[in-house]
Image: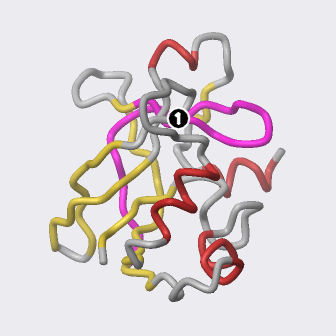
Amino acid sequence: MQYVFVYGTLRAGEINDINVAAARYDIAAPTLVGEAFVRGRLFDFGAYPGLVVEQVGDRALRVKGDVYEIDDALVAVLDEIEEVYPGVEGLFLARHTEVEVNGVALTCRFYPVAPDSARGWPEIRNGDWVTYRRAR
């Protein structure tokens, strides 16, 4: 088991809902641990967002997401959804970050984008893909 931070289309009710993805492959359902934030900036790539991680600086915002405890078998499914393949540099990157959920620090897998890839895309200033998408 491991933790994953999801901030875009993998969130519950979104087009790549992590719960639906697990069920599709008969993998144990993810367990929602809680809401968390990652320091960075969120961009609108059209059908999905991209998170650019920023650790310092006045322009860095908090990006809202959900933390799930997942079966290790679900990682390959999430990598496929995010088009993350070994040895291939794509739009999304598989990384780890530390987040706080209910006062507990957890290390989570997550899928940010390379900073250069966000150039020219509109920024989602509220840091919340779901709220932003619903308001479009």
x and y percentages locating residue 122 in the rendered image: 68, 23
x and y percentages locating residue 135 in the rendered image: 80, 50
Q: Nearer the viewer, residue 131 or 31?
A: 31
Q: Residue at the location (60% across, 70% down)?
A: 18
Q: Residue at the location (28% across, 48% down)?
A: 96
x and y percentages locating residue 100 in the rendered image: 23, 64
Q: Nearer the viewer, residue 130 or 114?
A: 114
x and y percentages locating residue 36 in the rendered image: 36, 62
Q: What amino acid is labelled 1 in the image? A: Phe
Task: Locate residue 75: give its quadrant.
Answer: bottom left
Q: Nearer the viewer, residue 89 or 59?
A: 89
Task: Locate residue 14: give its quadrant.
Answer: bottom right
Q: Residue at the location (61% across, 27% down)?
A: 123
Toward the right, the furthest residue is: 136
- Horizontal relation, residue 5 to residue 102: left or right: right
Asked if residue 109 lies in the magenta stretch, the reply is: no
Which colouring convention does the figure follow?
secondary structure
User: How many labels, in total?
Assistant: 1
Task: Locate residue 10: give its quadrant.
Answer: bottom right
Q: Residue at the location (83% across, 44% down)?
A: 136
According to the image, label 1 marks what residue?
A: 92
Prevailing secondary structure class for the magenta stretch in the rendered image: strand
Q: Which quarter of the figure is the N terminus placed in?
A: bottom left
- SS class of the residue under badge 1? loop
Q: Which residues are magenta?
A: 34-52
- Horizontal relation, residue 103 to residue 123: left or right: left
Q: Residues within 10 Å of mark 1 (few under 14, many from 20)?
A: many
